[in-house]
Amino acid sequence: MVRKNRKKIRRYLIAIIAIAALAAVGFLLLGDRTEEMPAAAVREAVVTSNTYTQIIDISGYVEPYDSQTLRFRSTGAVTGVFVEEGDHVVKGQRLASIDNTQQLASLQEIRDQIEEAELSGSERDLRLLRLKETNAENSLEYTNIVAPFDGEVASVDVDEGDFFEGGDEVITVVDRSKLKAVVEVDEIDMQYVTEGQDAELVFESCPEETVHAFVSYIPMLGRYTDQGIGVVDVELLIEDPPAAIMPGFTFEGTMAAESEVSMLLIPQNAITRGRGGSETVDVKRADGSTETVSIRTKYLGEGLSELLSGDVSEGDVLIVRSSGRSMMMDAPPAPPGGPR
């Protein structure tokens, strides 16, 4: 019995020693893993610069260079329609007329009165009759519709014998010798847009051809979109459009800045974002201290943002705080090598 008890005690001692050894190894392994994966890590990033050509993406649709819907300015029966849809017209050409009998009679009566006043009337009466004559001549002119510019008749909504009230729309004339388009440019990109600047457009109707346009007008006022973005409606002009392009056709294109632009690049993971979209970075100063600086940026992709405003300069060292896991997984991105 004594021998058996000694064997049991030996087995217990061996088991206890083995458990203690395993616990010690586990503690060592756990300690090593804790050192490899710290709860937080700090590294540094440098603000760099890049020179590029600013490319602005645009899209929209084209319209005739000029378009006007014409109206009768007097009331009466239509006595003549002298054009059809598709006709080419020149500025001042008569397109339609309404009955002008009353206007002719009024003008003739005033002219008869002028002849009498020139013989026996006073200078004051003559001046008044001259004003009435001008008014009667205008009323007679209002019985005709004439082309306001060289162009084509896009629509005719009148026939001889119809009765029209003054102000009714009857004929539309367009000038398609040139085409124009209005494109939205946001407030950030407007600094790169000037009158006369070239644009390259691509239409689905002729995808193999690049159509050249230029900025013909920049309004003095911008506007605020429903998305909260400030934009400017910039007008483009195509002076010699291909025959395959008609008003209403859509396009996509680009405008390039006339000169190269330099920008400061900040790693995206160095930016701290707060409430209301605020952005800050921690800048390491020469004496080793850290200063939090408010900035505004535009994300470019590839882990980089462009600095739009803020007291940060090329070569400044930024503090990047991240977990040990993200520190091991995230490599610092390379700056873009080509133009945007």
Image (tube, grey):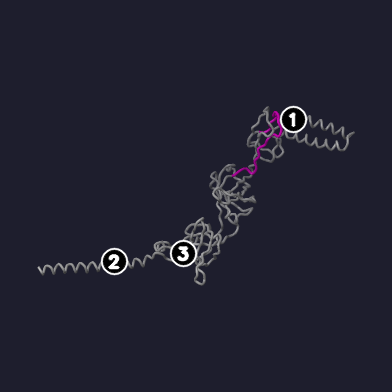
Give the residue type that dot 1 points to. Answer: Asn
Q: CA distance from mark 1 to mark 2?
A: 110 Å
* Chain-order first, disc 1 or disc 3: 1
In the picture shown, does residue 87 fall above or below 213?
Answer: above
Q: Residues within 10 Å of mark 2 (few under 14, many from 20)?
A: few
Identify the magenta region.
62-83
Q: Nearer the viewer, mark 1 or mark 3?
A: 3
According to the image, label 3 marks what residue? 320
What residue is rendered at 23% in x and 66% in y? 19
Q: Position of residue 336 (x, y in %)?
A: 50, 60
Q: Residues within 10 Å of mark 1 (few under 14, many from 20)?
A: many
Give the residue type that dot 2 points to. Answer: Gly
Q: Say what secondary structure mark 2 lies in.
A: helix
* Chain-order first, disc 3 or disc 2: 2
Q: Position of residue 3 (x, y in %)?
A: 11, 69
Q: Dividing the image into 4 quarters, which one contains the N terminus? A: bottom left
According to the image, label 1 marks what residue? 100
In this orientation, which residue lies closer to the viewer: 230 or 100? 230
What residue is rendered at 39% in x and 62% in y? 325
Q: Residue furthest bottom?
A: 287
According to the image, label 2 marks what residue? 26
Q: What predominant SS class does the magenta segment belong to?
A: strand
